[in-house]
Image (tube, rainbow, N blue to C red):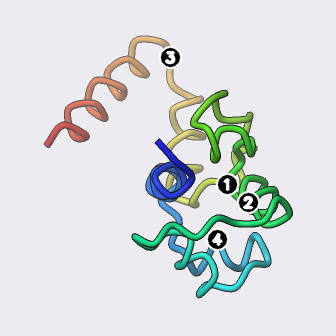
Protein backbone atom coordinates (compact mmCIF):
# COMPACT_ATOMS: atom_id res chain seq x y z
CA UNK A 1 0.00 0.00 0.00
CA UNK A 2 1.06 3.58 -0.56
CA UNK A 3 0.77 6.74 1.49
CA UNK A 4 -2.83 7.42 0.47
CA UNK A 5 -4.04 3.93 1.42
CA UNK A 6 -2.08 3.90 4.67
CA UNK A 7 -3.40 7.34 5.62
CA UNK A 8 -6.99 6.26 4.90
CA UNK A 9 -6.46 3.10 6.94
CA UNK A 10 -5.08 5.03 9.90
CA UNK A 11 -7.91 7.55 9.83
CA UNK A 12 -10.41 4.66 9.93
CA UNK A 13 -8.44 2.93 12.71
CA UNK A 14 -8.32 6.09 14.81
CA UNK A 15 -11.95 6.91 13.94
CA UNK A 16 -10.68 10.39 13.15
CA UNK A 17 -12.30 12.71 10.62
CA UNK A 18 -10.02 14.66 8.28
CA UNK A 19 -11.07 17.87 10.01
CA UNK A 20 -9.70 16.60 13.33
CA UNK A 21 -6.46 15.45 11.69
CA UNK A 22 -6.12 18.93 10.21
CA UNK A 23 -6.46 20.45 13.67
CA UNK A 24 -4.03 18.00 15.30
CA UNK A 25 -1.42 18.15 12.54
CA UNK A 26 -1.64 21.85 11.68
CA UNK A 27 -2.15 20.98 8.01
CA UNK A 28 -5.09 22.47 6.12
CA UNK A 29 -8.05 20.15 5.62
CA UNK A 30 -8.01 20.79 1.86
CA UNK A 31 -4.35 19.75 1.71
CA UNK A 32 -5.08 16.54 3.62
CA UNK A 33 -7.99 15.80 1.30
CA UNK A 34 -5.62 16.15 -1.66
CA UNK A 35 -3.38 13.48 -0.09
CA UNK A 36 -6.45 11.23 0.16
CA UNK A 37 -7.71 11.87 -3.36
CA UNK A 38 -7.37 9.54 -6.29
CA UNK A 39 -4.66 11.81 -7.75
CA UNK A 40 -2.29 10.84 -4.92
CA UNK A 41 -0.51 14.05 -4.07
CA UNK A 42 2.56 13.27 -1.98
CA UNK A 43 3.20 15.32 1.15
CA UNK A 44 6.50 16.96 1.97
CA UNK A 45 8.64 15.27 4.61
CA UNK A 46 7.60 17.93 7.12
CA UNK A 47 3.91 17.36 6.42
CA UNK A 48 4.33 13.57 6.61
CA UNK A 49 5.99 13.92 10.03
CA UNK A 50 3.16 16.14 11.30
CA UNK A 51 0.53 13.70 10.05
CA UNK A 52 2.34 10.71 11.53
CA UNK A 53 2.65 12.41 14.93
CA UNK A 54 -1.03 13.35 14.92
CA UNK A 55 -1.98 9.74 14.16
CA UNK A 56 0.55 8.16 16.52
CA UNK A 57 2.34 6.20 13.82
CA UNK A 58 5.78 6.35 12.26
CA UNK A 59 6.42 8.15 8.98
CA UNK A 60 7.81 4.87 7.62
CA UNK A 61 4.50 3.20 8.36
CA UNK A 62 2.53 5.88 6.50
CA UNK A 63 4.87 5.93 3.52
CA UNK A 64 5.85 2.28 3.20
CA UNK A 65 3.38 0.39 5.34
CA UNK A 66 6.25 -0.96 7.44
CA UNK A 67 6.76 -0.81 11.19
CA UNK A 68 3.86 -0.97 13.57
CA UNK A 69 1.93 1.72 15.28
CA UNK A 70 3.82 3.58 17.96
CA UNK A 71 2.56 3.39 21.49
CA UNK A 72 -0.27 5.89 21.78
CA UNK A 73 -1.45 7.41 25.03
CA UNK A 74 -4.99 6.54 25.99
CA UNK A 75 -5.89 10.23 25.83
CA UNK A 76 -5.31 10.20 22.06
CA UNK A 77 -8.36 7.96 21.55
CA UNK A 78 -12.00 9.13 21.44
CA UNK A 79 -13.62 9.48 24.88
CA UNK A 80 -15.91 6.46 24.44
CA UNK A 81 -12.90 4.21 23.79
CA UNK A 82 -11.12 5.66 26.84
CA UNK A 83 -14.22 4.86 28.93
CA UNK A 84 -14.32 1.28 27.63
CA UNK A 85 -10.64 0.71 28.40
CA UNK A 86 -10.94 2.17 31.89
CA UNK A 87 -14.00 0.05 32.65
CA UNK A 88 -12.35 -3.11 31.28
CA UNK A 89 -9.23 -2.49 33.37
CA UNK A 90 -11.36 -2.82 36.51
CA UNK A 91 -12.77 -6.23 35.54
CA UNK A 92 -11.35 -9.59 36.51
CA UNK A 93 -9.69 -11.76 33.86
CA UNK A 94 -12.78 -13.88 33.20
CA UNK A 95 -15.05 -10.86 32.74
CA UNK A 96 -12.52 -9.16 30.45
CA UNK A 97 -12.59 -12.26 28.26
CA UNK A 98 -16.40 -12.03 28.08
CA UNK A 99 -16.16 -8.37 27.05
CA UNK A 100 -13.53 -9.22 24.43
CA UNK A 101 -15.72 -11.99 22.99
CA UNK A 102 -18.68 -9.59 22.85
CA UNK A 103 -16.57 -6.90 21.16
CA UNK A 104 -15.33 -9.36 18.53
CA UNK A 105 -18.89 -10.56 17.89
CA UNK A 106 -20.13 -6.99 17.44
CA UNK A 107 -17.21 -6.14 15.16
CA UNK A 108 -18.13 -9.00 12.80
CA UNK A 109 -21.74 -7.80 12.36
Classify mark 1: helix, strand or loop: helix
Classify mark 3: helix, strand or loop: loop
Q: Which numbered circle lies on residue 54?
A: 2
**Labelled pair 1, 3 in contact (Cβ < 8 Å):** no
Chain-order first, disc 1 or disc 3: 1
Residue at (20, 32) in percent of width and height? 105
Figure check: 77 above or below 18:
above
Q: Which numbered circle lies on residue 21?
A: 4
Mark 3 — residue?
Answer: 92
**Labelled pair 4, 2 in contact (Cβ < 8 Å):** yes
The 10 Å Cα crowd at callout 2, few under 14, some 14 to 19, many 20 or more, is some
Mark 1 — residue?
Answer: 55
How far from the left and from the top, in percent, is residue 11?
51, 59
Figure check: 109 above or below 37:
above
Classify mark 2: helix, strand or loop: helix
Instruction: Tell me the CA gap for discs 2 and 3.
Output: 33 Å
Instruction: Tell me the CA gap for discs 2 and 1.
Output: 4 Å
Classify mark 4: helix, strand or loop: helix
Instruction: Tell me the CA gap for discs 3 and 4.
Output: 36 Å
Instruction: Tell me the CA gap for discs 1 and 3.
Output: 31 Å
Chain-order first, disc 4 or disc 2: 4
Amino acid sequence: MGFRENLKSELRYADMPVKELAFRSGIKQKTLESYLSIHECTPSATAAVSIAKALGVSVEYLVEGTEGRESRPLSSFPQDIQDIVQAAAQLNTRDRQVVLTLANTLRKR
